Image (cartoon, helix red, strand yellow):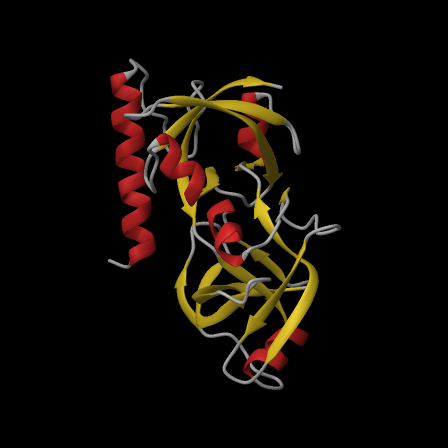
Amino acid sequence: MDEATLVELITQEVMAQLNTFHGIAGPAEGKVSSAKIVPVAVSVRHVHLAQPEIDVLFGPGYQLHKQRDLYEPGEFAAEEVVTLVGHNLRPLNNVRVLGPVRRRTQVEISRTDAITLGMDVPVRPSGQLKGAATITLVGPRGSITLPECCIIANRHIHISTANAREWGLHDDQRVMVRVWSERSAILGDVQIRVADNFKLVMHIDTDDANAVGLNCGSSVEIIDGE
């Protein structure tokens, strides 16, 4: 059994246990619960690369090598890693590259990472890079300093078009979610991202996860719109 399959099975089991605890029948295959239970994926620092930056960092015409598939269809962790260097010249080493190749390079870090790098990094939805921070990437074949490419990714939930319709949600909506943990909390300003092929999951960074006691395989509940 590969890692992606194992994570999927663990997530399903955790969701079933949570649904039982709250008196909710587990969702049927291909369905989602009316209680709007969402599994969590904790996102560590990573880099999405465009081909021009791949050419500089790893060599002209270089192609990424898949290490393992990620939860969302078509996305994968690559074998390749880079070093991030900020304003104070303190590096973050072995930062994983994620595929597939993007049209524009994007670096995603946490607030704690930004402090380590001595940088002021804005919180933004993925792809909204106007005004993003400048950062230097170092690879085995070269380095490059890129303006407007580094962000702290906002909290967001991936959901399929069919599931969003069932739950009365729409793309780019902001919602609140309830966290059950030893540090239970309500998290606000969670962006809904809808696409036909999305699998249901909430992405948060390591700072948020540590603050409220969540980890990969935890679940949260959407409780309100904003």
Quadrant of the frame with the C terminus: top right
User: Which of 190 and 29 lies nearest the eye of the viewer?
Assistant: 190
Q: Which residue sits furthest right?
A: 130
> Which of the pair 194/209 is nearer the observer?
209
Q: How many marks?
A: 0
Query: Percent x, y for residue 18?
Result: 29, 24
User: Residue at position x 48%, y 42% from top?
Assistant: 199
For the point 58% across and 82% down, the residue is 142
Measured as percent of width and height from the top left, residue 85 is found at 54, 66
Quadrant containing the N terminus in the rendered view:
bottom left
Left or right of residue 90, residue 144 in this image: right
Q: Position of residue 156 (x, y in %)?
A: 55, 37
Residue 48 placed where, x, y %? 57, 62
Establish if 125 lies above or below 213. below
Most distant residue in the top direction: 23
Depicted 171 relative to depicted 79: above or below: above
Instruction: Note whether 203 is above or below 3 in the view shown.
Output: above
Q: Residue at x 59, y 21 (%)?
A: 168
Q: Give whichever of 83, 96 is nearer the camera.
A: 83
Horizontally, residue 35 falls left or right of residue 59, namely left
**Left or right of 74: which side holds 18?**
left
- Residue plotted at (53% across, 30% down): 163
Q: Is 75 rendered above or below residue 65?
A: above
